[in-house]
Image: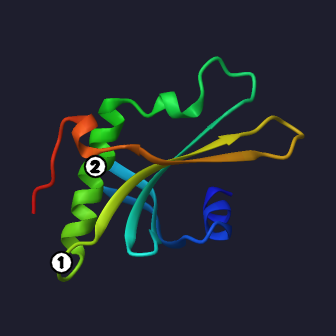
Amino acid sequence: MAARFLSRAGLKILVRNYRHRGGEVDLVARHGRVLVMVEVKSRHPRARLSPQHAVTRTKQRRIIGAAGAYLRELRGRPPAVRFDIVEVWQATGEVPRCRWIRHAYRLEDAGVGWSR
């Protein structure tokens, strides 16, 4: 559902569920010249915290680690990278709603950097 939502918004989905030692990127997409690493989180509309709050610094570090592995697999100079979150609000019997949070966090926020 999140991939379809982002595709309709103009992103090209490249990979779903990219995994690498202890980390995973739910969606790898391209938005213009930017490579977008997307974490998808869902919650019931009456949940106490939004899905975005489930993406802790530890989770961010794991995503960044997997993103770095993905970039190392690419040939040539790596593109600019952005980390986004798609929140999915879904209750039984209701139509799910998505919210796209661009630039949800940065490498500096997670306290890490790239290594090639």
Residue at the farthest left position: 116
Q: Is residue 21 visible?
A: no
Residue depicted at 22% across the width and 58% down the height:
68
Q: Residue 35: x, y in percent?
A: 38, 67
Within 10 angstroms of label 1, few (less than 14), some, or many (20 or more) residues? few
Q: Which mark is residue 27?
A: none
Is residue 73 placed above or below 26 in the rendered structure?
A: below
Inspect the image, locate mark 1, and give the three-letter code of the amino acid beneath it. Arg
Within 10 angstroms of label 2, few (less than 14), some, or many (20 or more) residues? many
Q: Nearer the viewer, mark 1 or mark 2?
A: 1
- Contact, CB < 8 Å: mark 1 with mark 2? no
Locate residue 3 relative to residue 59 in the image: left or right: right
Q: Which residue is mark 1?
A: 77
Residue depicted at 89% across the width and 40% down the height:
93
In the depicted view, which residue is nearer to us: 19 or 65?
65
Q: Quadrant of residue 44?
A: top right
- For marks 1 and 2 on the same chain, the one whose residue lies earlier in the sequence: 2
Quarter of the image that includes the C terminus? bottom left
Q: Which mark is residue 64?
A: 2
